[in-house]
């Protein structure tokens, strides 16, 4: 089709059809609807950010804080395998939950140290953790390598969540190397 043919067709259009098309109006969209959509997006973004930050309580920094959440009247016990040292704590896997009902066998968590944490060494001597002493890492002082089996007592913990892996935390009170 050539341009002239198209113009002829347009020119032959019934005037009634054109007038009727002009009468029809698009439905009016309220101005506030776009602002509601913007506000909903902002709320969603804030909700996602807050949710993400609250689920990642532990960081792999050099000064892990004491586990907050639940403080126990009497320490709970478990036997764990050290997976790796992490600043003021170590990552472990529970190999024997013993009588504790908080961390099951196979649980992954970080045992954090505070000023009340006591390490009982193989010769029977003890070392109390000093969070103020940054001169020598506690892993060098204690000397327990990754893979070591440790009897661990803990006095505080955060709720266990299987999907949190090493972000689960407990505060160690007495830690003793198993021979």
Image: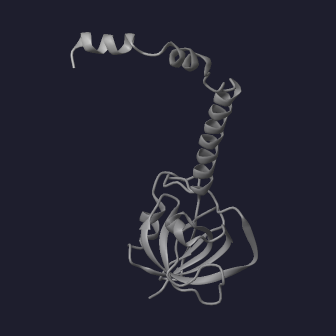
Find residue 10 and report its horizontal and vertical position in percent: 37, 14
Q: Is residue 72 left or right of residue 113?
A: right
Does residue 90 sit above or below 52 in this rendering? Answer: below
Q: How many marks?
A: 0
Q: Quadrant of residue 148?
A: bottom left
Q: Residue at x 68, y 23 (%)?
A: 31
Q: Quadrant of residue 156?
A: bottom right
Find residue 83 and report its horizontal and vertical position in percent: 42, 72
Q: Residue at x 61, y 22 (%)?
A: 24
Q: Is residue 122 left or right of residue 3?
A: right
**Which one is nearer the viewer's eye here, 61 or 50?**
50
Does residue 72 sit above or below 4 in this rendering? Answer: below
Find residue 95 and report its horizontal and vertical position in percent: 49, 85
Does residue 66 sit above or below 29 in this rendering? Answer: below
Which image quarter is the N terminus in? Answer: top left
Which image quarter is the C terminus in? Answer: bottom left
Q: Residue at x 38, y 73 (%)?
A: 145
Find residue 119 and report its horizontal and vertical position in percent: 55, 73
Which residue extends farthest left? 2
């Amino acid at each position: 089709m050539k341009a002239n043919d198209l113009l002829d067709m347009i020119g032959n259009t019934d005037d009634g059809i054109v007038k009727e098309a002009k009468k029809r109006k698009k439905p009016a969209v309220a101005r506030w609807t776009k602002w509601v959509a913007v506000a909903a997006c902002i709320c969603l973004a804030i909700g996602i950010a807050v949710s993400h930050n609250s689920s990642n309580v532990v960081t792999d920094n050099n000064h892990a804080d004491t586990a907050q959440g639940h403080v126990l009247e009497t320490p709970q016990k478990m036997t764990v395998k050290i997976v790796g040292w992490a600043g003021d704590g170590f990552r472990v896997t529970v190999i024997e939950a013993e009588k504790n009902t908080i961390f099951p066998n196979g649980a992954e968590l970080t045992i954090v140290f505070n000023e009340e944490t006591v390490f009982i060494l193989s010769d029977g001597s003890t070392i109390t953790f000093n969070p103020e002493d940054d001169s020598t890492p506690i892993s060098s002082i204690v000397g327990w390598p990754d893979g070591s089996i440790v009897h661990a007592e803990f006095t505080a913990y955060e709720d266990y969540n299987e999907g949190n892996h090493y972000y689960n935390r407990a505060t160690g009170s007495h830690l003793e190397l198993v021979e």
